Image: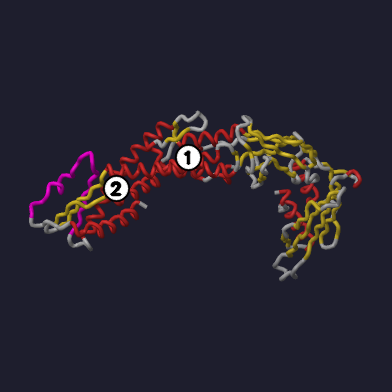
Amino acid sequence: MLRKSSLILLSFFYLGCSSSLTDKSSRRAPDWISRQPKDNSFWYGIGVSNLDSNDPRQTARQRAFSEVAEQLKVDIKSSLTDVMQARNSNFEEFSEAIIETRVDASLEYVENIDSYRDKKRQYVLARLDKNQYFDKIKRKKDEAKQKAKGLINKSINQMTSNSLSNISLSMESIYPYIDLFPKIEDPYTDGKQENVMVIAEKMIRKYNDDIELSFTPSKLSAKAFVDNGKKVTIVANSNSKSSNVANLRLSIRLNDEVTNDFIMLDKNGMTEYQLSRLEAPSGNHSLIFSLDYKSMMSKKALELVRLIPREYSLDISLEAPKIYFDGNVSNLGKKIKNSPIYSSLKECLEDNYSSVFVNSKSNADILLNLEVMTEERAARLGENFPYFIYSVGSISMKNQKTKEEILNSRFKDMKGADFSSKEKAGINALKKLSQNMNIDICD
């Protein structure tokens, strides 16, 4: 990006300054060729190019500007380092963007003030007026400060997604000038002047600390796989009563499982959450709610603040489901009573969901139906080739009370082989299926 700015600038120089400079090859070489000028009013740069290069004067100008830009870059990095140490923060990843902003701001003030050509080389001396540069940066900083002030004032009495977005914009508008410590009146301290970035961070952290979520009911009980649609009313309030809470987005996860679930608070800071069917072991679980800052703030603002969202927990007591098993496993048309598929499926449901298998439909919460069979899809190629048999099948689960289908899944086909008989090939296919059930509930 710095290189692009340099090219733009040099084009500007070429149009604006080329007519005012002439090469003095007949005079004695100026002192600045061997010794760069130094004073407190300017940054100087010297550019040199060989005469046999393409457009040596333009190349020399470009190099002169690059040298000015490097000095400017060092100055900015030094001031940013001071800020990082004062704030115990790291803005390294943003420094290039800040430098680019400053370099662009310097375009109109860099001037070519002298040139010289000897028998082999073209020389150009350029300089940047520090006073003009800093005056423009101050104007830009003041403009950004006023923009940030307006965005912050819009957000001070509201805790909404728009407020968080406004605060993000205020931080993004001011961060290119963070090393200049832009200050506005702090709305939390009766007009005391404070750094804009500090105020913005304070507002976000206040959101995080001040908002409280309440749940009605305060706890839930449910049955794994069965209960679906239990409702919880969620209300968000400001503990300090200083701000209205509305239209915030909340992320949701069950225990430590990362999900994409979210809900939105309405204009009154309320919402209703409907519990989905839970597929988890019996026992105590928690639904964790937190402000979804990632969707309401910019990535850059979040990286500057490095906020850990506060979490709010809703306890859930999960009961194990009772399952009545009804299944059929057959190999080439013959029913198999003790297939390993039965034991694998039972083990999956007991270990993963604490399920209890019962012998009576009337006592069951879930009706589980299993249909598995084997089939020959092509004739054996010859005596030197094995028999190939495939296992196919499906599983379904229904709510015994409502008859609602909970699960309907088809097993991945498995191939079994044997040189001596089709039946053994079929048994091998069923064995493979029992070892690789490939259904969501058993993954």
Relative horizontal placement of residue 347, taking residue 47 as reference (left or right): right
Which range of residues does the magenta coloring cover?
27-50
Residue at the spot 20% in from the left edge and 40% down from the top edge: 39
Q: Secondary structure at mark 1?
A: helix
Magenta segment: does it hold 33? Answer: yes
Q: What is the quadrant of residue 129 in the picture?
A: top left
Q: Secondary structure at mark 2?
A: helix
Residue 88 or residue 171, whichever sits in front: 171
| Residue 319 placement (x, y as % from top left) | 80, 38
Q: Single out the residue that lies furthest toward the front.
A: 191
3D distance between C-alphas at marks 1 and 2: 31 Å
| Residue 58 placement (x, y as % from top left) | 23, 59
Inspect the image, locate mark 1, and give the three-letter code of the amino acid beneath it.
Lys
Pointer 2 local density, CA inside 10 Å: few below 14, some 14–19, many at least 20: many
Residue at the spot 75% in from the left edge and 34% down from the top edge: 218
Dot 1 or dot 2, earlier in sequence: 2
Relative horizontal placement of residue 285, taking residue 358 as reference (left or right): left
Inspect the image, locate mark 2, and give the three-letter code of the amino acid beneath it.
Ala
Magenta segment: does it hold 65? Answer: no
Residue marked by disc 2:
69
Residue marked by disc 1:
149
Residue at the spot 34% in from the left edge and 48% down from the top edge: 105
Relative horizontal placement of residue 185, taking residue 57 as reference (left or right): right
Instruction: Give the number of callouts.
Output: 2
| Residue 285 placement (x, y as % from top left) | 72, 36
1 vs 2, front mark: 1
Q: Is residue 95 above or below residue 434?
A: above
